[in-house]
Amino acid sequence: MATNSTSPDLRLQTSNRQILRIALPISMALLVPQINFVINNVFVSGLGETELGTAGITGVFYLVFALAGNGLNSGLQGLLARRAGENRPDEIGRLFIQGLWIAGFFSAASILITYLAGPWILYNSIHSEEVYRDAIGFLKIRVWGVPFLYFFQMCNALLVGTNNSRYMKLGFGVQAAVNVVLDYCLIYGHWGLPALGFNGAAVASILAEISGLLVVLLIIFYKKFGQQFSLFRHLRFNASTSGLIFRQSSPLVAQYLLSIMAWVMFYIFIEHKGKRPLAISNAMRNIFGIFGIFAWAFASTSNAMVSNIIGQGKKEEVLQLIRKIARLSFCFTVVLCVLVNLFPDLFLSLYGRDQSFTTEAIPVIGMVSVGVVFMSVATVWLNAVTGTANTRVNLMIEVICILLYVGYIYFVLKVWNLSLVWAWASELVYWSSLLLLSFLYLRSGHWKKKNI
């Protein structure tokens, strides 16, 4: 297809400067909702330790759907970046619209699963009747935010895939601000609004996701991306193009679902140990979110840049590019992990728990930090595999690593009944094996034969 002469050149370079121009805006965009997530948990912790632990269960359950959207996002982003590398802007619009169609189907499935299967899953997994009751009531409200979340993710795939990641922070920023304000108002009943307690956080999150989507749509219209990428010329559902997106994305969706289901199992095992370990683990998940932002940002950059460079026909530059991205991801992540270990009391004090909570949590922070550092390199290499379009290989790697992870947590928590520190060492098992397998595959060169 001929290149649109009025469009800017979408082909990327492999310099550190180019990497940072893509990754840092993504980092800032991801930082905002993660800080918001912590604030949300701070508000919820004011209701009690039971609610804080329940927030961990519901948060992980909702992540099942959010990460399914991430799988679709990653697959679509890789395809958009490949067409950008080929400098074919008209094809970008065709892919984006079909991505929205698939997101709509995924949204409907997520809502049905929550209402039909959610109660059974939680009832047979959670020991505490109080935690079960609060969790299912929350999720039946929270799941209505999934359609807005999925469309928001597709719009962000467009921004990253076309080298416009700098605009992401606006949508995330508005989303976070709305969520914080409404959490304050709806959980405790301030400013004349009803006090909905734990469920107020669910309503606030939905309204925040709507706000974020509206902002990113305004950006797309204001920057005239519709004209630049022919976004509105192919509005009808197209089975062929949707099939391509689904084939690329479905292994990633399965990969993310396997990953989060293993984490759900982890949290269920932790819940069996009591409310305190569950509350501490929820705080550790916040650390993974906040102090892993650079890792996830550089991972997204790896996917987009590897796909773009391959689209340009520069396959010989791919491994060098991955190493550059991995080094930057490692350096930025280490700085954050050092800070949280120097001032752990400051971070843990946000949850308003007693000193015994902090004392028990500090050793776990050290182990989680090491896991985040491993993740900073491993996730870059794994997302480089995604960028090569060999998404089935992603799934194969994930299956192997999840089996190792699940085996580890089963023996540590159920058979040997070891401490929470050893339980969180499972992240080292997972990320080190994932790094090794991704590295070996990319070094093999088999990905060079793949065309999309």
Image (tube, rainbow, N blue to C red):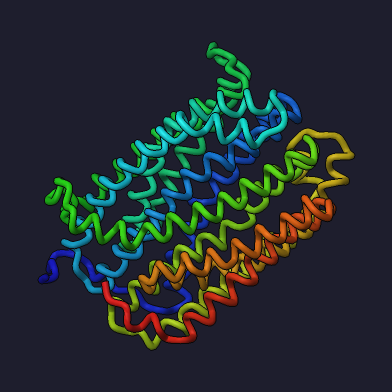
Relative image position of residue 423 (x, y in whole percent): 76, 55
Q: Image height check: is 310 above or below 295?
A: below
Residue 228 appears in the rendering? no
Relative image position of residue 143 (x, y in whole percent): 46, 32
Q: Residue at x 11, y 70 (%)?
A: 1
- The residue nearer to you, when weighing 48 against 251, is 251
Residue 80 image-quadrant placement: bottom left
Badge count: 0
Relative image position of residue 144 (x, y in whole percent): 42, 30
Residue 233 appears in the rendering? yes
Residue 9 image-quadrant placement: bottom left
Is residue 39 left or right of 169 when viewed as pictured? right
Q: Image height check: is 264 above or below 84?
A: above
Q: Residue at x 74, y 44 (%)?
A: 270
Q: Quadrant of the C terminus?
A: bottom left
Q: Residue at x 62, y 50 (%)?
A: 263
- The residue nearer to you, when weighing 209 against 219, is 209
Is residue 84 left or right of 278 when viewed as pictured? left
- The residue nearer to you, when weighing 400 against 421, is 400
Q: Image height check: is 312 above or below 293?
A: below
Q: Image height check: is 390 above or below 177?
A: below
Q: Residue at x 34, y 77 (%)?
A: 309
Relative image position of residue 189 (x, y in whole percent): 59, 15
